[in-house]
Image: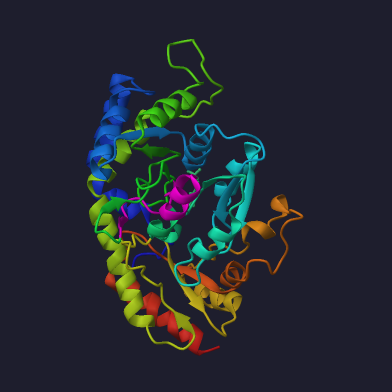
């Protein structure tokens, strides 16, 4: 049996090796390392895939979020609402820009932002919402867009884990995740669903004005060469990463199908176990399974992880500490106990190996060892 890893990028590469190597070689031969060339090709292909007007390639997903917020013209003290159960980058950029992060609890089933909590958190200072499509399935965008329209708030989607997932609105409209709000942000970190071989990210929007501003901000606030209209940053996707991504984009639907097939095999094995809750699939969104995350009941999670490790099965906790309990984000407004759902999830979730190359032998082994380890407790 192949070694089991959380993510198996080598086996994936072996299948696209020739195409990827040729793409990288082309970049080196043309020496178009930054801007132009492969970056433009990939940008256009991603715009077509997502059916969105503008894709702005940037240096990573965190930069994407930062640049998005910079383009909204917010001022110090403006409040931005985001879920407390997410990766730190989401809140980090809010704090870094001198804006005020307002964190809220999440839904127990989807792990995504709670709509009731969102509504309660809105004040006259609220300017934007950053929903996170956690683990690969969209937050409740019907409700979020309704709240945003009512209160005239910007919506910046953190689609770093959800590229390729499709949201179906109650009226039947289907939109790619990241292309629903004013702006969407994604990451091409190697382990993400569309990952490159280094750092990378992108911003999506259908708004021409925001697109122009974000392109300029990502390039030192420059529109005409050496004339700087606003304070910007330096954040760009390089051509070698774009060459890798362009090959992988062609395979993205297959990659998603492989992840969904692995999730289905896991679900079949774990359904109806009294100590395990399998992932809830939100009917309005496809789930692209960036992570396959279970909830455990009456299980010693640390001991379980140890038992699995002894069998060569990695398992991770995403995320062990919600934002409001992180040291760097200590804030008089929040204390332990304020967000009971997120806190309970942090204590009971576990993510199993999930990638595009899991085969039947591995899945059978993981599921049977996982059940044995739980039943032995
Ligand atoms: C990965 C990730 C980011 C940050 O992306 P980087 O490319 O690592 O900067 C932001 N938000 C979420 C939810 C992520 O999973």
Vertical position of residue 45 compared to residue 162: above or below: above
Vertical position of residue 224 compared to residue 125: above or below: above
Q: Which colour scheme is used?
A: rainbow
Vertical position of residue 61 compared to residue 352: above or below: above
Extreme right residue here? 332
Q: Residue at x 32, y 80 (%)?
A: 268
Report the front residue among 361 and 247.
247
Quadrant containing the C terminus in the rendered view:
bottom right
Q: Which residue is drawn at 46% across and 72% down?
A: 109
Q: Residue at x 22, y 45 (%)?
A: 250
Can residue 321 be seen by looking at this rendering? yes
Q: Position of residue 55 (x, y in %)?
A: 34, 35
Q: Give the range drawn in magenta.
A: 145-169
Residue 7 lies in the magenta-colored region: no
The image quadrant of residue 141 is bottom left
Q: Position of residue 276 (x, y in %)?
A: 46, 82
Q: Position of residue 48 (x, y in %)?
A: 23, 39
The image quadrant of residue 337 is bottom right
Q: Residue at x 42, y 31 (%)?
A: 210
């Amino acid at each position: 049996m192949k070694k089991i890893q959380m993510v198996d990028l080598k086996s994936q590469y072996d299948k696209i090796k020739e195409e990827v190597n040729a793409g990288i070689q082309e970049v080196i031969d043309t020496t178009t390392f930054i801007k132009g060339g492969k970056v433009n090709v990939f940008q256009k292909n991603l715009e077509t895939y997502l059916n969105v007007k503008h894709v702005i390639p940037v240096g990573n997903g965190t930069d994407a979020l930062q640049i998005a917020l910079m383009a909204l013209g917010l001022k110090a003290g403006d409040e931005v609402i985001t879920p407390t159960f997410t990766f730190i980058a989401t809140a980090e950029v809010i704090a870094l820009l001198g804006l005020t992060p307002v964190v809220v609890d999440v839904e127990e089933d989807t792990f995504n932002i709670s709509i009731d909590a969102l509504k309660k958190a809105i004040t006259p200072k609220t300017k934007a919402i950053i929903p996170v499509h956690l683990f690969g399935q969209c937050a409740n965008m019907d409700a979020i867009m309704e709240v945003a329209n009512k209160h005239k708030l910007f919506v910046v989607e953190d689609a770093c884990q959800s590229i390729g997932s499709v949201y179906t609105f109650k009226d039947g409209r289907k939109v790619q995740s990241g292309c629903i709000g004013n702006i969407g942000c994604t990451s091409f970190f190697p382990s993400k669903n569309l990952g490159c071989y280094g750092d990378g990210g992108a911003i999506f929007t259908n708004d021409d004005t925001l697109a122009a501003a974000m392109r300029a901000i990502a390039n030192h606030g420059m529109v005409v060469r050496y004339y700087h209209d606003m304070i910007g940053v330096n954040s760009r996707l390089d051509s070698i990463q774009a060459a890798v991504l362009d090959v992988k984009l062609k395979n993205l639907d297959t990659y998603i199908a492989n992840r969904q097939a692995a999730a289905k095999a896991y679900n079949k094995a774990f359904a109806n176990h009294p100590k395990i809750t399998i992932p809830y699939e939100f009917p309005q969104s496809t789930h692209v399974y960036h992570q396959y995350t279970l909830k455990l009941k009456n299980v010693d999670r640390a001991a379980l992880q140890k038992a699995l490790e002894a069998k060569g099965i990695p398992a991770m906790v995403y995320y062990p500490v919600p934002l409001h309990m992180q040291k760097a984000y200590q804030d008089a407004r929040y204390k332990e106990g304020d967000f009971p759902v997120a806190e309970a999830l942090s204590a009971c979730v576990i993510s199993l190996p999930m990638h595009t190359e899991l085969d039947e032998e591995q899945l059978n082994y993981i599921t049977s060892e996982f059940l044995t380890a739980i039943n032995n407790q």
